[in-house]
Image (cartoon, rainbow, N blue to C red):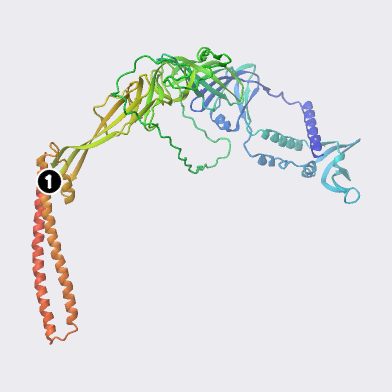
């Protein structure tokens, strides 16, 4: 019943609005124009520039719909042009106030979805016209009350009753009997209509219409441009390797999403690899301070370990050489390239009643794909342009933008921090496409069969990158053999400052056991250590900010050895005057071999040690004298305490007095000796200082 009565009320309101429009003599409404998207430029920084173009007639308006999250970008970046003498008018968009706040701003509050009885109670004092069966009544609403109808309590029910003042009469009219109700106050009717319109508009919280008004005469061309957040356009690659191992096919697919509210019909799509600075500013809704979201730290469980076989010890060992050569190995069906039984791809074997069929031709993934984009450099940026793209809103597409041959060299890549026991299968890839390749995943297919996945970062034209896509199980690398030793290079003394120059030499051996009968190109990556320099080591073919890359041949069925030697020269300075005796003795014993510490430096240190030892001996004597004085003084205190308890006329008192005199004589003697020792110590200190200050030995 409640739903039917509200429908009656809405029908009455609509009828009233139509009648008012038919009798109005106001100016004609602004016409609506469609201005479609004609140009889209997507940036790899996550924003996109959109341009609409079309024609309008006279005073016109066009409506564009955006997600709520995009309104801030629209308010920040919207640009407009009326090209043929017209002008841009007002731009309107819905308020961002909460719906409840918006509804409460109207004279009629429909926030809580009121029933017709509750709504009419809000309209007390308003004039209405109602239709009840064949009777039409007009009057003022006094209110709505509930009355009980029926017999006993089990059959009774409540009925809402409208109390209507008609003239001097109050009529009680049951609401279920009303078939039509009209508000006679146009202003009140307008308020209720606007409140209902706000409800309709808020129904889709993620769709906000922005209305752009153009004023002028005749037919005119208009353009609309803006920047909004868009999904980052991505690239996905396919690297197709052939039998020759020197040339491959690279396919690049651009992945784009039309997450806007407009269809793209025959638009010019540009994909730009640049990263313009872009930010968001909250111009549309209330601002709240953001707080960091702290996530509890998670710990990965320890994985079970597999203990692999050791590097072969009975294979011949050779030094890493140049590029590999030699013919490949004939592959038999049912066996891999190393002669081991293998699981075959479904395209290789077809089981029939007569046995094994001939291998099917591998998929040629490069035969039917052509790039649809033209590529061009824009200063420091790079742009792919697809001239004609049609993509419905909320749809995504993959577009081929790269289909070119590239140079590849099969390699095995070893890095102990990635995998300690085995290198990775990979290729040394050179970008010969002439295009800027954006970062993305690479699916590698070797002779039409999936070989693994890789990743590349941005690769400008002409540059090369390593790609790894699997584990090379046919090669083991042992890097456990390493040594380190220290050699004293020079030692000198300058005005009492000892300078020691040492050379640290480290050696690391990489033993690669190639268990196949085919030579392989091996690349070994080694971290660069600050201050260390390579010596007696093959020159790296490539160096990054933190890695050396050594390249050579891992000979078939042999253990190939690369030895990396590094050295670090350190300098240490020691202030001899302030250095302790034990430390000086340690330094004097440094470099006891021939050609290490010069003999004159060692002799200078020996004299300094002798002087410091003499000072130490005198210091010990002074301390011993001070200790003896302290002991005698303590004994004198004991004697004086005893003398207080004995009469002075007794022999024992005289004995104690004589002992005190003897102790005083001893103290005086010790003090004289201490003073002499102090003078000797000071003299030795001066001798040491004079010696060290004038000491310069190379």
Q: Is residue 81 visible?
A: no
On the rendered structure, is 448 left or right of 595? right
* Vertical relation: 84 (above or below) 561: above
Return the residue at label 1: 605
User: Which quadrant holds the N terminus?
Assistant: top right
Which quarter of the figure has residue 351? top right
* Vertical relation: 199 (above or below) 152: above
Residue 415 x/y as whole percent:
37, 30
Instruction: Specify the farthest residue to the front.
Output: 354
Classify mark 1: helix, strand or loop. Answer: helix
Total numbered labels placed on residues in the image = 1
Of residue 625 and residue 294, the one placed in the foreground of this image is 625
Residue 142 x/y as whole percent:
82, 46
Residue 388 x/y as whole percent:
56, 15
Of residue 545 and residue 168, the one placed in the foreground of this image is 545
Q: Is residue 59 visible?
A: yes
Residue occupying image coordinates x 78% and y 34%: 10
On the rendered structure, is 561 left or right of 685? right
Of residue 33 and residue 40, the one placed in the foreground of this image is 40
On the rendered structure, is 57 left or right of 604? right
**How many C-alpha atoms fall within 10 Å of the one at disc 1: few (<14), some, or many (≥20)?**
many
User: Which quadrant holds the C terminus?
Assistant: top left
Which quarter of the figure has residue 134? top right
């Amino acid at each position: 019943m409640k739903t039917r009565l509200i429908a009656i009320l809405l029908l009455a309101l609509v009828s009233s609005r139509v009648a008012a429009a038919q009798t109005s003599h106001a100016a004609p409404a602004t016409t609506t124009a469609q201005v479609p998207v004609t140009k889209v430029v997507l940036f790899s920084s996550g924003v996109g520039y959109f341009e609409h173009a079309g024609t309008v007639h006279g005073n016109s308006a066009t409506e564009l719909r955006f997600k709520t999250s995009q309104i801030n970008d629209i308010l920040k970046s919207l640009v407009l042009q009326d090209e043929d003498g017209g002008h841009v008018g007002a731009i309107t968009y819905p308020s961002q106030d909460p719906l409840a706040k918006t509804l409460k701003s109207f004279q009629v509050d429909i926030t809580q979805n009121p029933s017709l009885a509750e709504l009419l109670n809000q309209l007390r004092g308003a004039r209405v016209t109602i239709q009840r069966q064949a009777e039409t009544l007009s009057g003022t609403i006094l209110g709505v009350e509930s009355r009980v109808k029926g017999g006993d309590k089990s059959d009774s029910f409540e009925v809402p009753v409208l109390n209507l003042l008609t003239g001097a009469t109050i009529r009680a009219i049951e609401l279920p009997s009303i078939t039509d109700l009209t508000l006679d106050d146009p202003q009140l009717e307008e308020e209720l209509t606007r409140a209902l319109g706000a409800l309709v508009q808020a129904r889709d919280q993620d769709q906000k219409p922005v209305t752009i008004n153009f004023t002028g005469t005749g037919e005119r061309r208009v353009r609309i441009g803006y920047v909004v957040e868009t999904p980052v356009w991505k690239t996905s690659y396919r690297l197709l390797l052939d039998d020759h191992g020197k040339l491959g096919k690279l396919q690049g697919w651009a992945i784009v999403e039309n997450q806007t509210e407009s269809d793209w019909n025959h638009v010019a799509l540009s994909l730009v690899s640049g990263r313009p600075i872009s930010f968001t500013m909250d111009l549309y809704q209330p601002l709240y301070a953001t707080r960091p979201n702290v996530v509890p730290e998670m710990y990965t469980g320890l994985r079970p370990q597999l203990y692999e076989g050791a590097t072969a010890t009975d294979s011949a060992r050779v030094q890493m050489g140049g590029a590999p050569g030699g013919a490949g190995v004939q592959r038999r069906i049912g066996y891999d390239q190393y002669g081991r039984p293998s699981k075959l791809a479904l395209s290789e074997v077809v089981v029939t009643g007569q046995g094994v069929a001939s291998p099917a031709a591998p998929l040629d993934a490069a035969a039917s794909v052509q790039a649809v984009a033209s590529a061009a450099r824009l200063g420091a940026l790079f742009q792919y342009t697809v001239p004609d793209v049609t993509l419905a809103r909320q749809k995504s597409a993959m577009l081929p933008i790269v289909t070119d041959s590239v140079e590849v060299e099969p390699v095995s890549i070893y890095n102990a921090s990635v995998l300690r026991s085995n290198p990775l299968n990979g290729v040394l890839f050179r970008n010969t496409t002439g295009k800027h390749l954006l970062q993305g995943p690479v699916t590698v297919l070797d002779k039409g069969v999936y070989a693994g996945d890789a990743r590349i970062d941005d690769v400008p034209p002409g540059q090369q990158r390593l790609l790894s896509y699997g584990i090379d199980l046919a090669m083991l690398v042992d890097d456990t053999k390493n040594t380190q030793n220290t050699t004293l290079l020079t030692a000198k003394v300058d005005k009492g400052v000892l300078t020691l120059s040492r050379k640290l030499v480290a050696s690391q051996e990489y033993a690669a056991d190639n268990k196949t009968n085919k030579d392989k190109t091996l690349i070994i990556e080694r971290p660069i250590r600050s201050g260390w320099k390579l010596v007696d080591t093959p020159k790296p073919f490539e160096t990054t900010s933190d890695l050396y890359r050594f390249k050579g041949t891992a000979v078939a069925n042999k253990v190939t050895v690369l030895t990396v030697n590094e050295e670090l020269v350190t300098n240490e300075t020691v202030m001899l005057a302030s250095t302790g005796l034990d430390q000086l003795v340690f330094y004097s014993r440094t470099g006891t071999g021939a050609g290490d510490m010069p003999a004159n430096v060692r002799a200078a240190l020996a004299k300094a040690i002798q002087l410091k030892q003499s000072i130490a001996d005198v210091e010990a004597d002074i301390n011993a004298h001070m200790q003896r004085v302290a002991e005698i003084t303590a004994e004198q205190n004991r004697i004086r305490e005893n003398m207080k308890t004995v009469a002075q006329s007794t022999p024992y008192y005289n004995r104690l007095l004589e002992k005190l005199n003897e102790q005083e004589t001893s103290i005086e003697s010790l003090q004289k000796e201490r003073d002499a020792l102090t003078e000797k110590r000071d003299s030795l200190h001066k001798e040491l200082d004079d010696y060290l200050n004038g000491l310069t030995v190379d």
